[in-house]
Image (cartoon, rainbow, N blue to C red):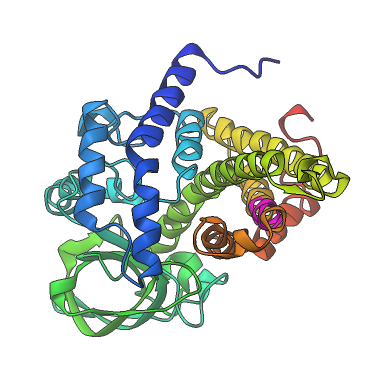
Amino acid sequence: MDFALSDEQRAIRDTARDFITREVVPLEQELLRRERAHRPGLERGELRELQLKARKFGFWGLATPEEYGGMDLPAVTQSLIWTEIGRSFVPFRFGGEADNILFYCNEEQKREFLLPTIEGERFSCFAITEPGAGSDAANIKLSARRDGGDWVLNGEKTFITGGNEADFAIVIAVTDPEKGARRGGATAFLVDREMGWRSEFIQTMGEGGPASLVFDDVRVPERNILGELGQGFTLGMEWIGKGRYTIPSHALGIAERALGMAIAYANTRETFGRPIGENQAIQWMIADSETELEAARWLILRAAWTVDQGMDPRHASSMAKLYGAGMVNRVVDRVMQIHGGMGYTRELPIERWYRQVRLYRIFEGTDEMQRLIISRDLLRGYTKLGGHLA
């Protein structure tokens, strides 16, 4: 078994790390200063400028097929890059991306939605979650009723990431209540904001915030159906599945950066005449964090490797999401404890991470849903103990 990175993977990872270190990390203090003043962090234009700088280095469309100008990188390489992105708390991501299910667009839709999104000229959000349908996504109620050549949408979506900024939404709506969402009764629609939906900001414990999207007799033409009629739930699950190895990859970068800060602090902060790193209590927190980091790293890379092998990634991705989300919460908590009172202030990013990573155990599949998937796969014989080595 070879656990080494290829020369190409290492070169791509190191180039991404260099870009994050030189171009993104220097912006952190300004971002913290603005947030302490209760102002927004970096503006969209500032983040866009970073993306265009990265494009000159060839970093554009990590997952985007080459025919659309992207890099079309393997999942393992994408995972490595998302870890590098996670090392900075600046909300940066490389440009040239579009929601994975937007590639189901027909030719007309590609010109109107997909290509402008890849170029950063349009901004999308994905809307499946509702007040009564979070983990139970099949319980969606937002309705789409056919009226001549249009569909009329009524209902509400909630906790929609990017919903305040998006100019169009990918909306999963019920088109056939008798069938139900899982059995072909839900459809995906591409809905421009100008068609009449509105967004309402939701304040959370983290920076920024998601949105509620309200649809009140919003008319959507038939040509705006994404994919096929009745394919909405399948597309929704495909969208969610992508995040189950990229989210913990990002969490890994956060945990590595935070632990590095703790190690540096433990070697320089003195109490009772000696560095606190000489205290066994501190040493054990550092040791436990490094062990969990390494365990998470291999769960995450194995999930990405499963994608690259063309295997069903759901079981491996659920384990990576479950463990990675828990790991980063535990590591950041220990890092705050090691820093003591300074870790609790807004002079350092630790308290910001503390609030940010709590979400990782909730969105795109809660801990409880991941445990349900993992146990169900074993109990029903969908997978074997020992994974692909069984």
Residue 195 appears left or right of 256 = left
Residue 340 appears left or right of 287 = left
Q: Where is residue 105 in the image (x, y as percent from the top left)?
A: 23, 50
* Residue extending farthest right: 280
| Residue closest to the eye, 8 or 312 | 8
Residue 111 sits above or below residue 146 on the image: above
Residue 23 appears left or right of 307 = left
Q: Which residue is drawn at 31% across and 62% down?
A: 125
Q: Where is residue 66 in the image (x, y as percent from the top left)?
A: 26, 28
Q: Is the magenta stretch mostly helix, strand or loop?
A: helix
| Residue closest to the eye, 386 or 229 | 386
* Image quadrant assignment for residue 201: bottom left
Q: Which residue is drawn at 71% across and 31% down?
A: 388
| Residue closest to the eye, 142 or 168 | 168
Quadrant placement of the N terminus: top right
* Image quadrant assignment for residue 17: top left
Q: Which residue is drawn at 14% across and 78% down?
A: 148
Residue 28 appearing in the image: yes
Residue 127 appearing in the image: no
* Residue extending farthest front: 273
Q: Give the range drawn in magenta.
A: 328-336
Q: What count of labels does the image hold?
A: 0
| Residue closest to the eye, 3 or 191 | 3
Question: Is residue 318 magenta-colored?
Answer: no
Q: Position of residue 76 (x, y in %)?
A: 51, 30
* Image quadrant assignment for residue 277: top right
* Residue extending farthest bottom: 216
Quadrant placement of the C terminus: top right
Q: Where is residue 183 in the image (x, y as percent from the top left)?
A: 48, 66
